[in-house]
């Protein structure tokens, strides 16, 4: 059976302001309490995680992630109220999009796709 997966991306100019990976990163920051720990949990470098956070913070009207330097109890990162709201809205919209794909176009595509690809030609 074929599988259809829709990937919702929100753009700010040419930048992806929010997509599935950035939403996962926000959830990891909320859980881990730091950008570096969230990046590690998702298998990405601190630099990559920081760049994604920077893009989100620059694209939204209010920052989604607040950072506090210093490490330990006083340092780390947390989602702002805007971050919590954006993440919840993104996840809800993603669910609506995924739930709304049933219909004749989906059925036609599903029927036209093989269960497995043919072997690659040499």
Image (cartoon, grey):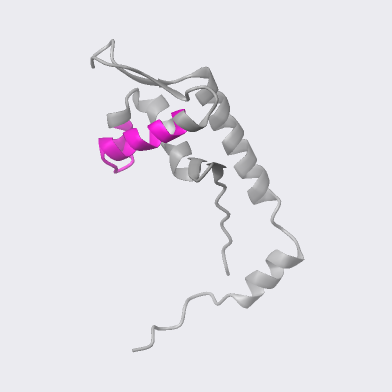
Give the magenta-colored segment's residue range.
37-57
* Side (left or right) of 28 relative to 106: left
Tell me the quarter of the image containing the C terminus: bottom left
Q: Quick check: can you spot residue 75? A: yes
Q: Residue 94 placed where, x, y %?
A: 60, 43
Q: Identify the residue shown where x is 56% and y is 63%.
A: 3
Query: Residue at point 34% right, 26% down?
Result: 32
Task: Check residue 104 for magenta coloring.
Answer: no
> In this orientation, which residue lies closer to the viewer: 100 or 75?
75
Quadrant in the rendering for residue 50 = top left
Which is nearer the eye, 39 or 57?
57
**Position of residue 25 measured from the top left corner of the image (x, y, whole percent):** 41, 36
In-image side of 1 versus 105 (left or right): left
The relative height of residue 109 versus residue 82 in the rendered view (above or below) is: below
As drawn, 78 above or below 88: above
Q: Main secondary structure of the magenta part?
A: helix
Q: Can you see residue 40? A: no
| Residue at x 57% of width, y 37% of height | 91
Q: Where does the N terminus fall, quadrant-wise?
A: bottom right
Pick out the residue farthest to the front.
13
In the image, farthest residue toward the bottom? 122
Q: Is residue 97 left or right of residue 15?
A: right
- Residue 42 lies in the magenta-colored region: yes
Judged from this view, the residue extending furthest toward the right is 104
Above or below 82: residue 101: below
Residue at 58 percent across and 61 percent down: it is 4
List x then y, in percent, for residue 38: 33, 32
């Amino acid at each position: 059976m074929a599988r259809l997966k829709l990937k919702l991306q929100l753009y700010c100019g040419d930048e992806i302001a929010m997509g599935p990976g950035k939403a996962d990163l926000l959830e990891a920051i909320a859980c881990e309490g730091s950008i570096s720990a969230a990046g590690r949990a998702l298998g990405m470098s601190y630099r990559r995680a920081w760049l994604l956070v920077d893009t989100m913070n620059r694209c939204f009207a209010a920052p989604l992630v607040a950072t506090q330097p210093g490490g330990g109890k006083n340092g780390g990162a947390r989602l702002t109220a805007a971050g919590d709201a954006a993440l919840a809205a993104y996840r809800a919209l993603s669910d609506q999009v995924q739930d709304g794909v049933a219909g004749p176009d989906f059925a036609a595509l599903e029927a036209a796709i093989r269960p497995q690809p043919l072997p690659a030609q040499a």
